Structures are given as C-alpha cells and as structure tokens.
Image (cartoon, rainbow, N blue to C red):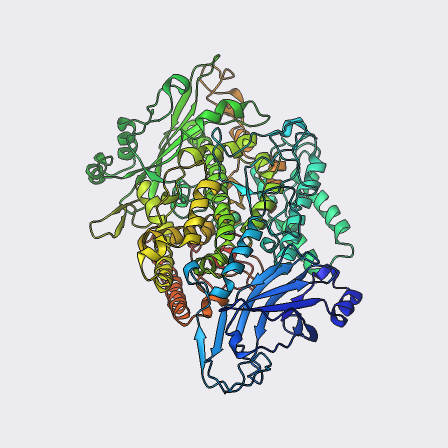
C-alpha cells in the first residue's frame, strides 16, 4: 500500500510518528459473501525512492470459502489526512511484482472520521480456482490450498452484475458522496452537490460588486458545485465570498495534485502579482492608452532594453511606469526565491511575443489573416454560413431586423476586387454558399446601452461578412456596426468596407475591424471557452460522481476526462469571472460578461449541438451526405479538418468500450446508475434546458453522448484554450476590448461626418480604442497562464489509464486508439506542409497544431501549441 502526506506537513516528526505507530487499518470484503476480514493494522515497510511514497504492509489470513476480494475499507487514525495511491494484494509466496488484486485509490482520506467510511473497489483481480485440497489462495493463508490456475476476472461492473458481497457497499459509497445538501462544505469532504452561480460578487463589502444570480428561469445557466457558505447580508440571494480567492471548496479528490498545484499556484501568484503591482502603479489612471504603436512593441522587447526613447517621460511613456516598476519589483521579489521561481517571474514580465507576431510583424493588420483566424485561430467556432442577413430580435425595441449589407453592396465589393472572369463566378455567390459571417448582432445588441454606461468602454453589435475565394480562403468584405435606438437617440448603424478608395475609408475599416476583434475575443473567452467547455462540463462531473460507482465502466471511461475540472472552475470563480475580476476588467462587455454567457446559454446552447459534426452542420459549415459522410462547406477549414479526425477516433474508442460492456440495448436501458446519471445531468446539472438531450436507450445514443462529452473536454477545449497566448499574446492581433466609439458616430462629428480628433491623429484614435496599458498588463500574464500545459499533463490517446489497462479487450481497443491518434499527428504535419492548404500554410503563416495529438514534451516549453490534447479541462 502506497501512502503520502501533504508536502507541507511532511516534517521529520510527523514522518517518524507515521512510521512508528499503528494508524492505518484495512478490512477486506468478500465479493461473493457478506464476509470481511476484520480490520488489521498496516505496518511501515519502506520508502519508495521513485514516487517518494511510504509503503505499508499488512498480512491477512482467510479461508478458501472467503472467495474473491470485492472491496477494501480503509480507516485512517492518524492525526492528519493522508493520500492513498494504491493497494496491492499479493498471494502468499507469489511473485512480488505481480499483484493478485489491485486497487487504484488516488484519494485523500480524512482522519478520525468514522462517519465517512472509505471503500475502494479493485481494478484488476486475479483469482485462484477454488479447488479443495490445494495450496495457497492466500493473502498469507491460514487454510492451505494450492493454486493450480489463475483466472483474470473483470472488475468493472454494471449495477446488475455487482457481486453479491459488495452490492451494499456500492450503494453506501454513492450515498456518502451525495451528502445531505446541508451546511458549509469543509476542505476535507468529498461531497458533490449542485448550486447556482450566486457567488461571484461581494455585496457586503462593496455594493458595486452585486451581480445577478445565474441559473434559474430568468437567467438560465449550468449549475456549479455547491459550497454552502453563508448568504450575504446585503443580498440574501448571493453567497458570501470565500476567505481567500483560492479557498473555494471542491470535493477533496478534485483538487490539483501537489505537483500540478505547485506549478499552478506559482503561475497564478505571478499573474496576481503582476495585476496587483500594475494596478497599484497606475491606480487612478487605469484608462491610460499606449502612447504609440512602438510602445506596444516595446512591451515585448527583452527586458525593455530596446524600448523607444520617450518624448514625454511623465505622461505617456510606457517605460515610465512599466519597465521601471517591473525591474524594481522583480529585484525586490527575487530575494530568497528559488531559481525556478525567478525564471518564471522573468518570463512573466517579459511578455514573450506570440508566434504569429514573430513570423509576420504585419499579420495583425492583414485582412487575410483576420479572415484566416476565423478558420484556424483561437476561436474557429463562430464562423457560419449566412445570407440573407436578418435579426430575430424584437424590431419594436431594437430597430429594423434587416441589414445594410445588401446584395448590391456585396456584389459591388466582390466585383470590385475580382477579374472579369471571376465576376461570373461571384455574381451568384449568395446561391453558391460563398458568403460567411461572424454574427455578433443579436447576441450583443441587447447589451449595448448598458455597456455604454460603464466607464471607459463602448459597444456595438456587429456583423462581419466574408467571401469564399476560389483559392479556398476567406476575404472580409463588409462590417456593419449597430447601436440600437434609445429614448433619446435614434438607431445608429453603418457599414464599413475594406475596398475603399480613400485613406479615410481605410482607417475606418481598421477601426471597425478592431471592434469586431474585441467582440470575437470576448465571445471566445465567455462562450467558446468558459461556457461551452469549463462551465457546461462541471455538471457532468458532479452527476457522474453522485450516480456512477467507481466500479461502473462508464465512470472509469469518463473519469480521466473530468480530472481537475471542478478545481480549475473554482479557481476561475475566485479570480477570473468574479465581479471586478480579470475578465470583467479587461474583456468586452465589461461587468456584463457573465450575463452575456447566460444569454447565449439560454438562446443557443443545446447538448446535442455540442457534438462536432452537429455544430458544423448547424453553422452551415458542413452538410451530411446521403451516405452519412460530412462534406465541409469550406474544404480547407483546419479546425474542422483536424477536429473531425479526432472526433471519429474518439467515437471508435468509445464504441469499442461501450460494446464491450453492454451486450444488449436493454442493458443500457436497464442500467439504473447510468440512467440516474443522465437524468441528473439534465434535471439537476442543466435544469434550465429542456431540449436537446438524447435518451440513453441504445448503443448509438450512448456512444454519441459519451463521445460528445469527451470531445468537449478534450479536443474542443484544447482548440480554444491553448491558442490564447499564441494568438492574443500580441494584443493588437486580438484586442480584448474596444473602448472608443467609431469616429463617425455621435454629436462630436463636424460637417464632414468625422470627429475632428480622428482627422488630426487617426493613430491616436486606434490606440485609444485598443485596451489600456492597465488592461493589457492584466490580461497578458493571465493568457500566458491559461495557455500553459501543466506538469504531469495526461494527453488523450497516449495516457494509458490503469482502469483501461486492467481489461485485455479494453487494453487492445486503447492500443488501436493510440495508433490512430499517432497517425492523425502525422496527417496534421503533412497538412501543415501542403501548399494547397492556404489557411494553414504560407509565408509567415502559423501552422495549425492545436488539435495535434502528442505525448507531450515537458522539455520543450517554448511551443505551447505543440503539446497535444489533454484528456480533461484542467487549465
Ligand atoms: Fe481552459
């Protein structure tokens, strides 16, 4: 048995105490009868040099009639919690390295808590045939029997197949995990329960941080893990904040392992540090823009040594406060710190340039790159086929539902940049499905007035139209920005086009693009990333733990894909999505960010549309042919090209797995735990959504549901998570917010329809529209943190889970999964070298590797994007 203590409390005294007295007791249960061995103490044997675990040993004698081992009960009477890695049972006289029964526990066990009995069920079991008069079945035997043959028996059981001896234990264990729904949860508990998002503000301390409850009829939302803290006095619908931002309860075994927590805490501390120091330095002037484009580039220069000379040292010089502050603070902070920490700190303040900027300094300005990133960037999930354009919003409230981007305007734009020969091809572009759109009209318009009341920001609704060229690339042809009418002002809307013939039109296009990029970056963070992956997956995790036993094969299939998701979501509630947190402070639409994600969940989210093929079909990016194959509307769509390979590969693995454990459709239908899980996902985890949930009544629907969940937790998340710093690290390429109205809107315009400041200094208007210096220094370290892979990351298709390896057929199926994933990696490499695929190959073009399977290479930390697809959402 391998045991660990928390690093922080592994003092010599504690270790000596742990080694010298009896405190760990084991009790084995028979799988076929109600017998158990009676608790026996385990004694310290040795230290495992490789893992650093303490190995404990205990001897048991049982009669032959005891039968196979079905469970173990572990009691911790030490004075602190301990981590149990695994328990192995060896036959007396058997080979030391080959266990007869293996328990993979990986669990913290609280101390002196008789109410919380801990049962573990075996992963692998080899049993002797129970011949009489033979020797040694034993776990150090009393009865002498001879083992003449060893059988390997499966140890994942559907509820109906549960061995008689552990039926009650299976139920008891689940009951303990569900808890009673009362009281505040303590750090050491392992209770999984649901609650609404009512813990983002701190109205008792600051009334301005009061936020609406997300979850319920008014603002539908997935549920989070219940923590049970007291309600706020100032707002009884809100839960009071935790004592510390990282002190939010999650069930004990959901917490990061120490290795992962160490790295994460370091990085998180650094990002907070950066935010704090910057905020302190610029307090009172969080609105300050960058003084020049050169000053933005200076942010990324090594140690700010190459920063441009300042003409106005006090007011507008980026090094005036940033570089000086950073250097002083870093020196101060480095005192007494370890080398690893120092290196992290240096990296953090260096703001490394992203690959996209390294390869092509002008990429952020190019229309072609703007369009390419809708197919192969960090948010390839918004582009859709759409024409004609209309709004579903109420015309009475929001104005006309049509668009100023008319057929005539489109044809004018396309013809303007095409040869005569191509014109024939483009005239019927509408009919030929050549027009695509980023549609942030209906989703943003209801928030425009509220956002415009916030300090130092603005908002429009936007529609951006793209045309598919004969080369298979997209070209932006029009952006429409809209502000709805209000009691005092009429509706304002205007279309901007790139093919203008004047400098004015060119500048206006650049500014309009900045607004659209801010919309897309905000939507990416709040919807494609947070809502659709982190937030929607949490209820699947909670329900799985409450309803599926550890010995259930579907629990064992899903568990690796759920690892650490609840923990990272709790961290996000503490420092990212909370009121006045980093997301609200720096992303469009400011303090309404979370409400926006609720509105999207309400209107657009459906479980069955989260499957990659269904998502592509819904957006018009693919059609399903008669033979069931998908045909992509844009052939060279890197996210879809690679994603579909991954999707198919997951589906085959899930099919093999499901078919192995369920012989008949009725086995699925009659599986009480499985049905209980799915029912709870729908009615308790996502109770505000009634539509879009398949019934689990046959192999096909179960495979589709599981594939969807695994895809969202792995491929979908990797595609939107690990490209954040690589694409948005150079922020002009992906500004998180746009702070100024278009210079053609408003009363400040002179007779030519322009604001005079724009005519005098258009660069200044662009810099003022970009995020402020404060927002930039807040966001960059966080994007860096979020794009990082963790030490010990488990990659999909390459990390072999012990539970899967314990079964011969499942092991073989996983082997095939692994081979497929490695072939996909080679295919992706080939695609990235193919000159015909212009959306992922070309001069200065960053190859698309966000969905490339990989074993992970912790030695090469320079290329975050090459690291592979983690099994679960853990960052
Ligand atoms: Fe993430």
Q: Position of residue 814 (x, y in %)?
A: 41, 66
The image quadrant that residue 382 belongs to is top left
Give the residue drawn at x 47%, y 64%. 164
Say whether residue 412 is left or right of residue 593.
left
- State whether residue 779 appears in this view: yes
Image side of residue 228 versus residue 560, left or right = right
- Nearest the viewer among 509 and 443 is 443
User: Is residue 845 visible to us here?
Assistant: no
Quick one: quadrant of the N terminus? Answer: bottom right
Q: In the image as oriented, which residue stretches furthest toward the right?
A: 13
Give the answer, above or below, for where 14 lies relative to 323: below
Q: Is residue 409 above or below residue 23?
A: above
Number of callouts in the render?
A: 0
Q: Residue at x 74, y 64 (%)?
A: 10
The quarter holding residue 294 reads: top right
Q: Position of residue 347 (x, y in %)?
A: 63, 53
Give coordinates of residue 308: x percent, y percent. Answer: 63, 42
Classify residue 564 as left or right of residue 345: left
- The structure residue drawn at horizontal position 50% and vertical position 22%, both measured from the top left corner, is 449
User: Quick check: 757 above or below 573?
Assistant: above
Residue 297 spot, x, y in % from top left: 57, 44
Query: In terms of depth relative to the viewer, which is nearer, 255 or 328?
Result: 255
Q: Residue furthest top?
A: 488
């Amino acid at each position: 048995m391998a045991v660990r203590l928390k690093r922080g409390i592994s003092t010599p005294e504690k270790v000596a105490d742990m080694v010298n007295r009896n405190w760990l007791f084991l009790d084995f249960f028979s799988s076929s009868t109600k017998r158990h061995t009676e608790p026996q103490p385990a004694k310290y044997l040795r230290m495992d040099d490789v893992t650093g675990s303490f190995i404990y040993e205990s001897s048991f004698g049982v009669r032959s009639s005891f039968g196979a081992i079905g469970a173990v009960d572990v009691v911790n009477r030490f004075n602190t919690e301990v981590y149990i890695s695994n328990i192995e049972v060896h036959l007396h006289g058997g080979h030391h390295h080959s266990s007869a029964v293996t328990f993979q526990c990986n669990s913290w066990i609280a101390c002196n808590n008789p109410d919380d009995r801990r049962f573990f069920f075996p992963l692998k079991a080899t049993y002797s045939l129970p011949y009489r008069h033979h020797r040694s079945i034993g776990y150090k035997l009393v009865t002498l029997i001879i083992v003449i043959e060893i059988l390997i028996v499966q140890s994942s059981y559907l509820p109906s197949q549960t061995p008689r001896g552990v039926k009650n234990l299976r139920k008891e264990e689940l009951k303990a995990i569900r808890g009673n729904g009362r009281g505040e949860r303590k750090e050491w508990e392992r209770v999984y329960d649901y609650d609404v998002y009512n813990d983002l503000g701190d109205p008792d301390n600051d009334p301005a941080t009061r936020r609406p409850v997300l979850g319920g009829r008014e603002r539908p939302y997935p549920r989070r893990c219940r923590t049970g803290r007291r309600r706020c006095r100032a707002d009884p619908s809100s839960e009071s904040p935790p004592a510390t931002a990282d002190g939010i309860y999650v069930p004990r075994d959901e917490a990061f392992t120490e290795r992962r927590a160490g790295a994460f805490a370091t990085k998180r501390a650094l990002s907070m540090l950066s935010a704090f120091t910057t905020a302190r330095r610029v307090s009172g002037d969080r609105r300050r823009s960058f003084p020049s484009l050169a000053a933005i580039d200076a942010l990324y220069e090594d140690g700010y040594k190459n920063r441009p000379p300042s003409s106005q040292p006090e007011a507008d010089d980026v090094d005036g406060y940033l570089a000086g502050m950073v250097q002083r603070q870093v020196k101060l902070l480095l005192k007494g710190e370890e080398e690893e920490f120092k290196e992290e700190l240096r990296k953090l303040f260096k703001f490394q340039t992203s690959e996209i900027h390294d390869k092509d300094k002008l990429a952020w300005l190019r229309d072609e790159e703007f369009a390419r990133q809708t197919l192969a960037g960090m948010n390839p999930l918004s582009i859709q086929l759409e024409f004609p354009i209309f709004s579903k919003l109420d015309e009475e409230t929001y104005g006309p539902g049509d668009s100023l981007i008319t057929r005539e305007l489109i044809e004018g734009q396309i013809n303007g940049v095409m040869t005569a020969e191509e014109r024939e091809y483009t005239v019927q572009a509408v009919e030929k499905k050549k027009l695509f759109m980023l549609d942030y009209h209906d989703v943003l318009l209801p928030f425009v007035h509220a956002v415009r009341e916030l300090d130092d920001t603005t908002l429009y609704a936007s529609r951006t139209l793209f045309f598919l060229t004969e080369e298979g690339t997209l070209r932006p042809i029009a952006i429409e920005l809209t502000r709805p009418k209000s009691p005092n002002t009429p509706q304002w809307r205007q279309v901007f086009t790139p093919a203008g013939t004047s400098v004015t039109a060119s500048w206006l296009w650049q500014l309009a693009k900045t607004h659209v990029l801010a919309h897309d970056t905000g939507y990416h963070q709040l919807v494609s990333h947070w809502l659709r992956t982190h937030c929607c997956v949490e209820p699947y995790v909670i329900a799985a733990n409450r309803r599926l036993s550890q010995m259930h094969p579907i629990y064992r299939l899903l568990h690796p894909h759920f690892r650490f998701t609840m923990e990272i979501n709790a961290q996000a509630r503490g420092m990212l999505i909370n009121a006045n947190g980093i997301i609200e402070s720096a992303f469009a639409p400011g303090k309404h960010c979370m409400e926006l994600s609720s509105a999207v969940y309400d209107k657009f989210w459906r479980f069955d549309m989260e499957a990659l093929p269904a998502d592509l079909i819904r957006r018009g990016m693919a059609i399903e042919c008669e033979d069931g194959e998908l045909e992509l509307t844009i052939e060279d769509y890197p996210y879809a090209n690679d994603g579909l390979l991954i999707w198919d590969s997951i589906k085959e693995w899930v099919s093999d797995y499901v078919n192995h454990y369920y012989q008949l459709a009725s086995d699925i239908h009659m599986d009480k735990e499985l049905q209980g899980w799915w029912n709870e996902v729908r009615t308790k985890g996502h109770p505000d959504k009634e539509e879009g949930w398949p019934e689990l009544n046959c192999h096909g629907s179960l495979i589709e549901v599981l594939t969807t969940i695994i895809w969202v937790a792995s491929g979908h998340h990797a595609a939107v998570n690990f490209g954040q710093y690589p694409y948005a690290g150079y922020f002009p390429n992906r500004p998180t917010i746009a702070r100024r109205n278009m210079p053609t809107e408003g009363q400040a315009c002179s007779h030519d329809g322009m604001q005079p400041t724009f005519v005098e200094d258009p660069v200044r208007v662009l810099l003022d529209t970009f995020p402020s210096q404060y927002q930039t220094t807040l966001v960059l370290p966080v994007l860096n943190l979020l794009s990082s892979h963790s030490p010990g990351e488990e990659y999909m298709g390459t990390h072999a889970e012990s539970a899967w390896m314990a079964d011969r057929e499942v092991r073989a199926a996983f082997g095939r999964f692994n081979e497929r994933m490695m072939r996909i990696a080679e295919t992706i490499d080939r695609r990235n070298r193919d000159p015909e695929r212009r959306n992922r190959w070309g001069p200065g073009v960053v190859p698309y590797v966000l969905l490339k399977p990989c074993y992970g290479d912790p030695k090469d930390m320079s290329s975050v994007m090459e690291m592979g697809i983690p099994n679960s959402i853990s960052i």
